[in-house]
Image: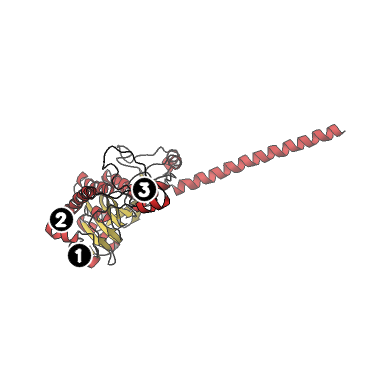
Amino acid sequence: MSENLERSKKGRGCGFGCALMLGLLIGVGLLFAVVLVGGLKVMNLPPDNAVAGLLGQKHRACDVGEDEAPYMVEKWSYGTGTVKVIRVPISGMIMLGESSWYVGNANTVLRSIRRATHDPEVMGLILEINSGGGGITDSDIIYKALLDFKARQDGRAVVTIMGDVAASGAYYIALASDHILAHPTTITGSIGVIMQSYNIKELAQKLGIHDVTIKSGDNKDMLNPFRDVKPEQTEMLQTLISAMHERFVTLVAQHRGMEKAVVAPLADGRVFMAEEAVRCKLIDSIGYNEDAQRKIAELLETDAVKIYRYDEQISLMDLFSPQPGIGVKLDLDKLLRDSTGGTKLMYRWDW
């Protein structure tokens, strides 16, 4: 009798365990379905390409490579005209690369411009800038992409509307515009180059920290924080900075229709409020988003424009295999170095 009771208990236990496992499987399946449906909405994937998008198999808008014309979700932003214009927000530190998403949206900016360049329906861009600048080469790459956008197709135009700040590298980018507007409270300018480092030689000595550097030449470790910078090294670095500054001044003179001799006194790093920037011919006018919309319609010789924006398409594969500007990869050391400028040459507004 006891054996029968034991077998009965085991049977009930097995039945309960199997039911529990089945319930868990059903629950996980339902949860996955909810996440899948919600993920499609969050990622803004088009219905006909949703599954492929989740797996990282992204549809391209035209017959070119993903990096040349990235697939991005196009959304109607505002306006009811017949001429298509893309608004491109530019915010935070202008830095391109895998870990630059935490300081700004430069990767998305560049991808948006390239996407628009290869869409024959897009006739204009409105840059909405709120940035104090960033890397020299990063700013120059975006500036060149804007020139390429206009050169790709006749009749295209670019208008910039500045927010709180559009200084240094951000102003450098704006130079590629056909018209630059600023809000009445915008701070702009800061035409110049900066390189920063730290010297902790005395602190290291107090803490008993000794530098060990093996190098191939005297100048290989310039700006080593454990050593004083030699006068001849300072002169070398100043030559680099002066050359980068000269390029900036030259482009301002070229795009703003000014003599370099007139630009030079304005290019000592100072910043300007909007009214003064207009007087100095660094920008064209003062206004708001509606004025930028009217201006680009005027440049495109139409009564009204229809404004779109691009949203990044993020797949589940991107989250686990981070792409430039996308994913969960976090390099704290690089974050600190990039956010403080490190020892990079920068077109960046700094107090």
Task: Give the CA distance from mark 1 to mark 3.
Answer: 32 Å
Question: What's under tag 2, amino acid-wise?
Answer: Ala
Question: What's under tag 3, amino acid-wise?
Answer: Ser
Q: Mark 2 or mark 3: which comes first in sequence?
A: 3
The answer to whether residue 200 is visible is: no
- Residue 215 position (above or below residue 42): above
Q: Residue at x 16, y 52 (%)?
A: 250
Q: Residue at x 22, y 67 (%)?
A: 275
Residue 218 screen position, x and y as percent: 26, 41
Question: What's under tag 1, amino acid-wise?
Answer: Val
Task: Give the CA distance from mark 2 to mark 1.
Answer: 15 Å
Task: Give the CA distance from mark 2 to mark 3.
Answer: 30 Å
Q: Quadrant of residue 10?
A: top right
Other-residue count near label 3 (Cα within 10 Å), few / some / many at <14 / 14–19 / ≥20: many
The quarter in which the N terminus is drawn is: top right
In the structure shown, which secondary structural element does the residue marked by tag 2 occupy?
A: helix
In the picture, the disc for residue 278 is 1
Q: Residue at x 50, y 46 (%)?
A: 37
In the structure shown, which secondary structural element does the residue marked by tag 3 occupy?
A: helix
Residue 309 screen position, x and y as percent: 34, 52
Q: Mark 2 or mark 1: which comes first in sequence?
A: 2
The answer to whether residue 32 is visible is: yes
- Residue 282 position (above or below residue 145): below
Q: Which residue is mark 2?
A: 253
Q: Is residue 161 left or right of residue 20?
A: left
Residue furthest to the right in view is 1
Q: Which residue is mark 3?
A: 100
Q: Is residue 33 left or right of residue 319?
A: right
Depth check: 7 or 172 in front? 172
Residue 260 screen position, x and y as percent: 13, 56
Residue 195 screen position, x and y as percent: 28, 52
The quarter in which the C terminus is drawn is: bottom left
